[in-house]
Amino acid sequence: MIKRIFVSMLIGIAIGALISEVTFIFLQETARPPREVVLTIPTGTAEQVARGEQPPSIPKDMIFVVGDTLVMKNEDSVDHKLGELWIPANSTAELSLNEEQNMAFECSFQAGNYFGLDVRQSLTWGTRIYGVLYGGLPLGILIALYSFVIPAKKKENARA
C-alpha cells in the first residue's frame, strides 16, 4: 500500500514537472538575474522613421526582469526620446526597471512612435520547484486514490 502511494506520488510529480517545465520554456527570457540591457539606436534611424520604416535592429517591444537597467545608446545624429527619457545624439541614457509592470512609451525611434516594455519577476529555481510541487502533489494524490479504487472494482467483477 505504501509502495503504491509512493509510486503514485512519483508519477504525479513527474507529470507535474513535465507540464511545469514545458510552460517555463516559454518564459526563458525571464529565467535570468537582473542585468544591464543595452539598446542601440543606429545611425540613420531618424531618416528611416521619417520614411515610415521600422529600424530592423530595434525591436517594437521588449521583456525585462525586475531590477534590469535599460541603457539607451544613441548612435544617430538626431536626439531621440523614450517617454520622459531624453537621449541626445551620440550619448547614452539609462532607465531603471525596479517594478513589475507593463509600460507603453512614446518614442522617436520607432515608426509607430510607440515602444512597449514588459517588466516581469525573475524566474528562479524556487519558482520552478513551487510549480512542479503545486501541480505534481495533488496529481500524485489523485493517482494514488484511483489506484485503490480501480483494482477493487476488478476483483468484485471477477467474483460475480
Image (tube, helix red, strand yellow):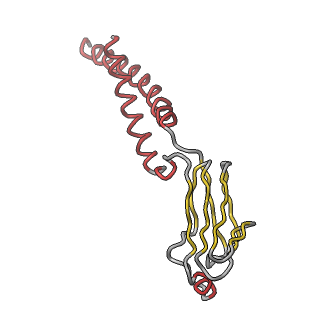
Viewer-closest of 149 and 39: 39
Q: Quadrant of the N terminus?
A: top left
Q: Quadrant of the C terminus?
A: top left
Measured along the vertical axis of the image, is residue 1 above or below residue 46? above
Measured along the vertical axis of the image, is residue 61 above or below residue 124? below
Residue 43: % across, % down: 56, 81
- In this picture, residue 154 sits left or right of residue 23: left
Q: Quadrant of residue 73?
A: bottom right
Residue 99: % across, % down: 68, 48
Q: Quadrant of residue 45?
A: bottom right
Q: Residue at x 33, y 18 (%)?
A: 153
Measured along the vertical axis of the image, is residue 97 above or below residue 145? below
Viewer-closest of 16 and 155: 16
Measured along the vertical axis of the image, is residue 78 above or below residue 155? below
Q: Residue at x 54, y 69 (%)?
A: 59
Residue at the limit of the structure toward the left, as seen here: 158
Q: Residue at x 39, y 28 (%)?
A: 12
Residue 147: % across, % down: 35, 20
Residue at the limit of the structure toward the front, as seen here: 90
Residue 112: % across, % down: 64, 77
